[in-house]
Image (cartoon, rainbow, N blue to C red):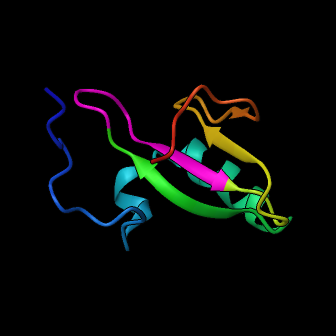
Amino acid sequence: MNRERRKGLPPVPGELEKLLNNIQLITLRELQNFGWTVELVRRPLFTTPIAVLKSPDGKKMATIEEDGTVNYNPDIVIR
């Protein structure tokens, strides 16, 4: 059975500052200076949310991990 688990939350919440930790926000701002945009924020249960970014050309995805590192080869599936 494939039940939908999302609860109608927007993919990019208006208040990233309340979801991401300080080091994630610093990394996010740095990447935004190079044209990367937030595609969505993954909010897994009981863990820190992870921002999923799209490259300026729209061909690559990356995640900002809990410790602020950037994963340019994330193991995620975007539906």
Residue that extends furthest to the front in the rendered view of this protein: 1
Q: Residue furthest bottom?
A: 14
Q: Is residue 4 magenta?
A: no
Say which residue appears at 64% left-offset and 53% top-offset: 53
Position of 30 compared to 16: left or right?
Answer: right
Could you tell me which residue is drawn at 31 percent across and 66 percent down? Answer: 10
Residue closer to the observer: 73 or 70: 73
Residue 46 percent coordinates (x, y) = 23, 27
Which residue shows up at 48% across the image and 57% down it? 40
Q: Position of residue 32 (x, y in %)?
A: 74, 65
Figure quadrant of residue 13: bottom left
**Quadrant showing the N terminus:** top left
In the rendered structure, the answer to whether residue 40 lies left or right of residue 38 reads: left
Quarter of the figure with residue 7 = bottom left
The kind of secondary structure the magenta stretch mainly shows is: loop
Q: Is residue 34 left or right of residue 12?
A: right
* Residue 39 picture location, percent across and down: 56, 60
- Residue at image point 39% right, 62% down: 11
Residue placed most toward the observer, 8 or 65: 8
Identify which residue, 38 or 2, lies in the foreground: 2
Toward the viewer: 58 or 25?
58
Residue 56, compared with residue 51, is above or below; it is below
What stretch of residues is rendered in magenta?
A: 44-53
| Apparent side of residue 69 relative to residue 9 in the rendered image (left or right) | right
Where residue 71 appears, as percent x and y from the top left, is: 71, 31
